[in-house]
Image (tube, rainbow, N blue to C red):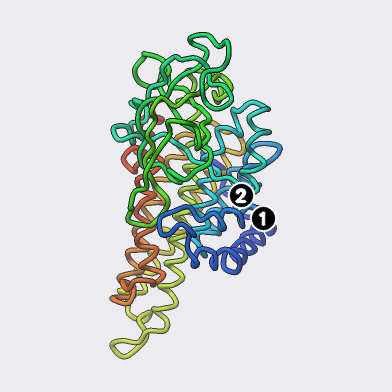
Amino acid sequence: MDPVTTPFTLDREQRAWCAELRALAAEKLRPLADEGAPGGTGSVNRPLVAALGELGLLARVVPATGPVSAMDLCLLRESLAQECTEAETALALQGLGAHPLLRWGTAGQRARWLPDVAAGRIVTAFALSEPEAGSDAASLRLRADPAPAPGPGGGPGPGSGPGSGWRLTGEKCWISNAPEADLYTVFARTGPAPGASGITAFLVPGDRPGLTGSPLEMLSPHPVGTLTFDGVPVGPDDVIGEVGGGFTVAMRTLDLFRPSVGAFAVGMARAALRAAVAHAGERHAFGGPLKDLQAVSHQLAEMATRTEAAALLVLAAAASYDAGEPGIARRSAMAKLFATETAQYVVDAAVQIHGARALRRGHLLEHLYREVRAPRVYEGATEVQRAIIAKELYR
């Protein structure tokens, strides 16, 4: 096993930035989230995405120069999540959808798309999951059949020969920002080999002919939907990275974003803990405040300890990623696993301390209770993270 990362704490500048982010989320972003998406519940809130761009926050996850800082990503997600989960999710989805392009795209691809992504003018999506390929991403079935390369309107280009392009046929499911995204990173099978081999990443604009989709109603009303590819044309200029190298693109992207999913979870846990501490100090029962009851005070102590442990594990994973240390896949999986499970526990315990009032629609904890469940599933379910950790122990 590789060495454990040296323990650390955030410096003064980082703490100040987190406080600034929380203030921005509460004052600038929360009102936009409360207004709701113009397209209705469950659709993309484009004014919110635009505000993230105007405030310069998207530029931290889609930087014009240099790599993405995993630490910045985690601090952003945790801070925003404490005040506005909708803003946190909108920022994360922009980063996730654009990261393959940022890291593996050509200079032309990056120049064409990334300025608009960072400005919040276009919405991106990461299209990996399928109806029969969720946690087992290597079993995806979306076909990329050889075809003439697309020309300017999506049709075959003049003089293009067979094999110079592909037609995408199949489905994607559980795709955040679908079917409204302007740009998708799509993973499809270009070769006959089973498993991870033969998968290629493509850049697919949302207006390509043959691409349709429909929204899905989820437990928490985020923009999530399906995509149907009916011979969607893509060419060599749409390939991200190398033909056949798409699975590596997907997994390395998730290595970066998994700790930040943990940061999102920590942010929700902190918000729930803060609410529980305040309520226990104000609410009187059995002759005194709830905090004086040992059952409640010990519960709060456990919630606080687990939240702090989760935060440190997330930040250690981010520091390891930025330092280029070995064992990134294992550390990322550990951070996501522990933080998301912890957040579920903390939010549930906070609801219990509040009682029935926390179950009322519109209460902070009612909102968090719906929000906290999904991170234990997406970007690799808890069980998948355990499998990754166990496999890495013997690598």
Out of 50 and 17, give the one closest to the viewer: 50
Query: Where does residue 199 sit, x and y in percent of width and height?
Result: 43, 21
323 up-or-down from 337: above or below: above
What's the mark number on residue 120? 2
Can residue 310 be seen from the camera position used here? no
What's the residue type where badge 1 is placed? Answer: Glu
Horizontal relation, residue 312 to residue 225: left or right: right
- Residues at circles 2 and 1 in contact by the CB criterion of under 8 Å: yes
Q: Which residue is drawn at 34% across and 17% down?
A: 194
282 up-or-down from 8: above or below: below
**In the picture, which quadrant includes the C terminus?**
top left
* 10 Å crowding of disc 2: few (<14), some (14-19), many (20+): many
What's the mark number on residue 34? none
Give whichever of discs 2 and 1 has the lower sequence position: 1
335 up-or-down from 253: above or below: below
Residue 79: image quadrant is: bottom right
Out of 261 and 206, give the one closest to the viewer: 206
What's the residue type where badge 2 is placed? Answer: Gly
Out of 154 and 354, give the one closest to the viewer: 154
Query: Where does residue 68 sit, x and y in percent of width and height?
Result: 62, 40
What's the mark number on residue 54? 1
User: Helix, strand or loop at disc 2?
Assistant: loop
Query: Where does residue 355 sit, x and y in percent of width and height?
Result: 29, 75
